[in-house]
Amino acid sequence: MMKPRCGVPDHVNGSGTNLPQNHKHDYKSFETVAHYQFIRGTPRWSKSHLTYTFRSSVQVPASLHMKSVFQSAFQRWAKVSQFSFEEVPANYYADIVIGFHRLNHGDGEPFDGFKGVLAHSLPPSVGKCHFDADEIWSSNPRLNELDLESVAVHEIGHLLGLGHEPTKPEAIMYPTFSYGRIKRELNSDDIQGIQTLYGLS
């Protein structure tokens, strides 16, 4: 629990509230076993075209190239699912609202400053996605920086209904992350999870 991690709680032996429900599907595909998990209650979006916008309570550095980073992150999921994603202006209704915030930011899940919880997201169809502004975010991370796109791809998985997969470090949905690392590609387990959740496998 000391590693930098996503703030969405893990499922531990069926205990706790708002935890991902263990939905292991132990079938073989290309000689691998799938271990993906879904959020408790398996919430799903009832539509395939989702809008998103940005609303932060702190100033986000222009050097992050936030819009292009998230466009790329959403596209990774669009390529393997039925979803399409469209950015809309901040004053429009959006299915997904992305923001950078510090400490207590009004959702009952305060951030903890530099290191610790990096981000958290709420599942379908709440669509809130928050990043800790006290972290050092980058699109080309150095040793003490976090790759924004890598963490965004993970958080989008939660926004679509996937839970953490704590047994597969190579999966995007693994709950912890390392500073200075780039991990943007969806793993076969992530792909099988999203396709099974929405009936595409």
Image: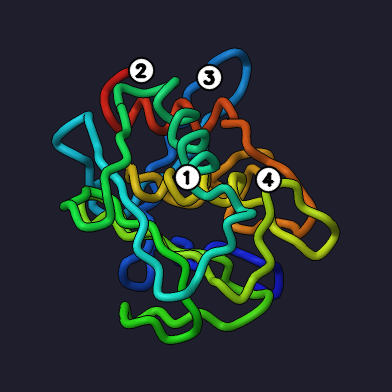
| Residue 97 can be seen, yes or no | yes
Q: Residue at x 58, y 42 (%)?
A: 172
Above or below for 125 versus 81: below
- The three-letter amino acid code for the residue at tag 4 is Pro
**Residue beneath label 3, please?**
28
Q: Residue at x 26, y 23 (%)?
A: 199
**Residue mark closest to the camera, 3 vs 1:** 1
**Residue mark closest to the camera, 3 vs 4:** 4
How far is mark 4 from mark 2, CA to CA? 23 Å
Q: Dot 2, how many residues are within 10 Å of its Cα: few (below 14), some (14-19), or many (20+)?
A: few
**Residue beneath label 2, please?**
201
Outermost residue, right side: 143
User: Do tag 3 and tag 1 residues touch (Cβ < 8 Å)?
Assistant: no
For this view, does 47 lie left or right of residue 151?
A: left
Q: Residue at x 53, y 65 (%)?
A: 60
Q: Quadrant of residue 160?
A: top left
**Residue mark closest to the camera, 1 vs 4:** 1
Dot label at residue 67:
1
- The three-letter amino acid code for the residue at tag 3 is Lys
